Amino acid sequence: MTLTDLGYNNELEKYRQEQNLTAFEIGRVTQEHKDRYKVSTGATEWDCELIGNLRYTAQDRSDLPAVGDWVAFAEYDEGKALIHAVLPRHYTLERQAVGKFGEKQIIATNIDYGLIVQSVNRDFSINRLERYLTLCYASNIEPIIVVSKIDLIDKQQVDVLIKEIENRIQNVPLLSVSNATQAGIAALKEKVYNGKTYCLLGSSGVGKSSLINSLSGKTQMKTGAISNSIDRGKHVTTHRELIPLVNGAILIDNPGMREVGITETSGGIETTFEQIQELALQCKFSDCTHTNEKGCAIKQAIESGTIDEASFENYLKMEREQAHYSSTVAEKRKKEKAFGKLYKQYKKSKSRNND
């Protein structure tokens, strides 16, 4: 396996040349464990850490490496190396950091497709699907919806669930699979292309690790048995990991996400709820709240069944969440600016007193 097999291209090499990084080796981050990283060159995997300057000049977490990143590094001991630079990212998939409102958490970088996995049992939620779609669209990542564990219910029930998704979500590839029987796996493999990176998204126990094993044709990941009490597989993935497949595609596995928090998501909500956005432009009043106004195109569409009321309610919830996040970020920046100004005044005053 080579760097090219991992996705390295001429654009990245050009940047390496322009930034005088040719003295360093180039690799891709395959795992992240707090302050340490696994970096692969295709032929060799390295245990890496950051140089002090890169660590201490980082303004926030997004300035540090994440799974999927390309980095420039240098060996300092057998099998060990220091990361000196992070190369430009193609696309970054991120969500709101859990328990830290106003902050982002990077899920993975340099992704082409998001494989959104939902199982047919207790995890099934179209509202959550729309959240994952919003994250993908905000990052210009192409989504693919995978409905898993279809062996747990009969074909008629599967068809009903697929129809429910199609009624609310259009123009997104939708496949149903079973890792137990391998039904639908061949069709999914046809959408996994050489040289492209796919990020698996979904809650714990939906079968992401089993899906990796099915796509790779061998046991790459540990899987948990289905619990009879909750009808759900046990969560076994504890960290993000980049996994090359034999056909040249690359998968990034993720721990299950219980929360899919919305950030600014510029363009994400608009694309996910494109029909609602277009209808809003047809309302009689430009400041329509879509509640009691006469001539509200969205109310009329809900009453006629053109759009799903649950989808509209999910849209409103995500819009409020996005607005709250943006206002929180703006307030934090305002405080940081005020503190910076105060600190400069203090330094200036101190300098005068010393004179």
Image: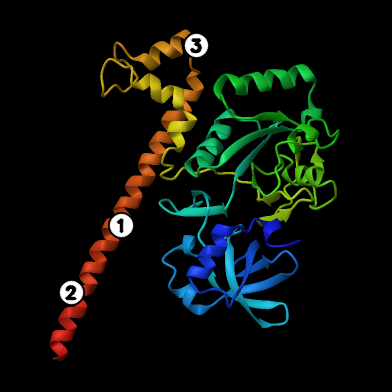
Seen in the image, is 209 located left or right of residue 65? right
Seen in the image, is 325 located left or right of residue 309? left
Q: CA distance from mark 3 to mark 2?
A: 61 Å
Residue holding disc 2: 345
Seen in the image, is 44 located left or right of residue 58? right
Looking at the rendered structure, which numbered label has been put on residue 333?
1
Q: Nearer the viewer, residue 235 or 174?
A: 174
260 over 300 or under it: above or below? below
169 over 25 or under it: above or below? above
Q: Are marks 1 and 2 in contact (CB under 8 Å)?
A: no
Among the 4 quarters of the image, the one containing residue 341: bottom left
Looking at the image, the residue that sits furthest to the top is 304
Q: CA distance from mark 1 to mark 2?
A: 18 Å
Residue holding disc 3: 305
Q: Name the residue type under label 3.
A: Gly
Q: Mark 1 or mark 2, which has the lower sequence index?
A: 1
Callout 3 environment at 10 Å: few (<14), some (14 to 19), or many (20+)? few
Residue at 72 percent of width and 19 percent of height = 159
Q: Position of residue 89 (x, y in %)?
A: 52, 56
Res. 120 visible in picture: no
